[in-house]
Amino acid sequence: MLSGKGGTGKTTLVASFATLTRKVVVTDCDVDAPNLHLLLRPKIMQTQKFKGSKIAVINKTECTMCGKCEESCRFDAIRNFTVDPILCEGCTVCAYVCPVQAIELEERISGYAFISETKYGSMSHALLNPGQENSGKLVTLVRQNAKLIAEKEDCKLILNDGSPGIGCPVIASIGGVDLGLIVVEPTLSGIHDMERALGLLNHFQIQPLICVNKHNINVDNTRRIVEFCESKGVEVAGKIPFDSLVTKAMVAGKPIVEYSPKSLVSKDIVELWNRTLKHLDFGT
Amino acid sequence: MIIAVASGKGGTGKTTVAVNMALSLGKVQLLDCDVEEPNAHILLRPEILDTLPVYTLIPRILEELCDYCGKCAEFCTFNALFVAPKAIMTFSELCHSCGGCSIVCPKGAIIKEKKQIATIKKGIIGDIELVYGELNVGEPMPIPVIKEVKKHIKGDMTVLIDAPPGTACPLVASVYKSDYCLLVTEPTPFGLHDLKITVQVLKDLKVPMGVVVNCAGIGDRKVYEYCEEQGIPILLEIPFSKRIAELYSQGIPFVAEMPEWKERFQQLFNRIMQG
């Protein structure tokens, strides 16, 4: 699941899909602003420390203030023989060029990965510590964990909730997937970002599907999205209406299809899910 | 004065706040640091005056000098080089441009090469200057582009920074060295959850902050309770409104059609300036 633009409804849909599926492993690949657990309420069974990055530390008593480290650092992370941990990317060049071995790299715990159980199946998720780097590596860990669980449980379906954007964590969350479902809202920004997300799926040769969420907030833009997709040969697998019930379900901490199964929005989500499943081959 | 606009959760209205505030204040510089999905230009429709490529430095191997000793691959923390007995490969998307490989190579077989990863566009809308970056599709690293966008900051102007969603390094790179940060949130469990993480990032960075509640009226009161507990001022509430949502969907900044809001954004700015 991806969107380019944030806040288009990825998590709402993934949580609903999870309730509609008998056997599934769900991941939350948005590791720095995860929300899926607020709807699926997982019980954490296993916690792993994630050491994603290293930080250079200068030993002041050894340092001869030669300045070689500062000169070699491409990230401008060293000033006055002190490392700025925010700018340091842990490349180790400073430690290498230091003639008196006064610099060491310290590993830092950048976050945690979790393996959990939910009412709907197993869940692999994580939490990056605030402001940390390497969210892509943590996404990769989340996906590796999901794969191991799926193999163990003989489960053929993994649902990945993604993060906004098209950069490193998103690329990590779509590598090797069979299908990419883009959730778009019918706003000019939404369309712009969908086109870039579609470009990303094309770049990695992943089959795209489109879902228009809140389609009734701008019918003209929804039509433009449908026409655009037709011209590109991309299927629009569903259109979900705006409904304040979605926020109410979120406040109640429940997937919308469970909170209000008879609502129009839930019916449209079920239909979207059934159409999405047609594109997946479970080898049966 | 540099004011960043951030959120944690995506789609809460960062760009809406940044753009409408810029139009209300006038004579400001707006930097769109969401280089993965920049949107400010869609609402502002600037006249583009300048287009600049953004390059990173990646290694180029001079194979005639390389003896496949493997020291470069061993050194590279980012696994951007792979050396086999009679071959060497580079993975430029993984490279952080630290230059370590060419420093450690005993044969001088690695030189640096420029690779374009993004484009920066500069434009104007009346007396507003817009600078935004566009990461090339397929490129994973926004940080060098964010840093490049921020090099265009003019010290003598009021600068607004539209930050990307999330709470990881792209957020840090965007708000780093800002004088103030406006946190735009929606009053929902998702909004609150991500707001809390973002507040932690700003505390670590020692950037003072205030909250703008967007789509006020939906969800619950927990964002308000949290802000009160933490002593974070709520500086503005933008109600959930069909009219505002429609205007946004058409790419129209709402102060253009609802000018009474200009004063509210000016007051918001004054409150920030008064500390």
Image (cartoon, coloured by chain):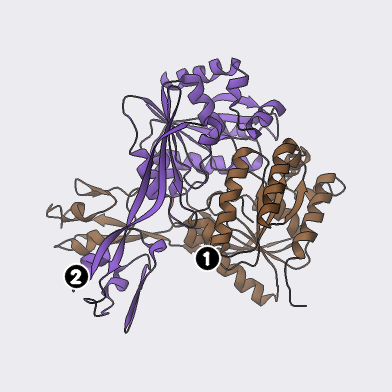
* Relative to A129, A179 lies left or right: right
- Between label 2 and label 1, give the one nearer the viewer: 2
The chain letter for the residue carrying disc 2 is: B
**Do the residues under discs 2 and 1 have CB atoms within 8 angstroms?**
no
Reading the image, the residue beneath label 2 is B108
Give percent across and percent down for residue A91: 31, 60
Camera-side residue: A34 or A9? A9
Seen at 76% across and 46% down, the residue is A240
Which corner quadrant of the image does residue B110 belong to? Answer: bottom left
SS class, disc 1: helix
Q: Is residue A3 visible?
A: yes
Reading the image, the residue beneath label 1 is A141
| Colour chosen for chain B | purple
Which chain can be seen in brown?
Answer: A
Q: Residues within 10 Å of mark 2 (few under 14, many from 20)?
A: some
Q: Is residue B275 visible?
A: no
Give percent across and percent down for residue A190: 62, 42
Seen at 77% across and 58% down, the residue is A273
Disc 1 marks a residue whose amino acid type is: Leu
Residue lying furthest bottom? B85
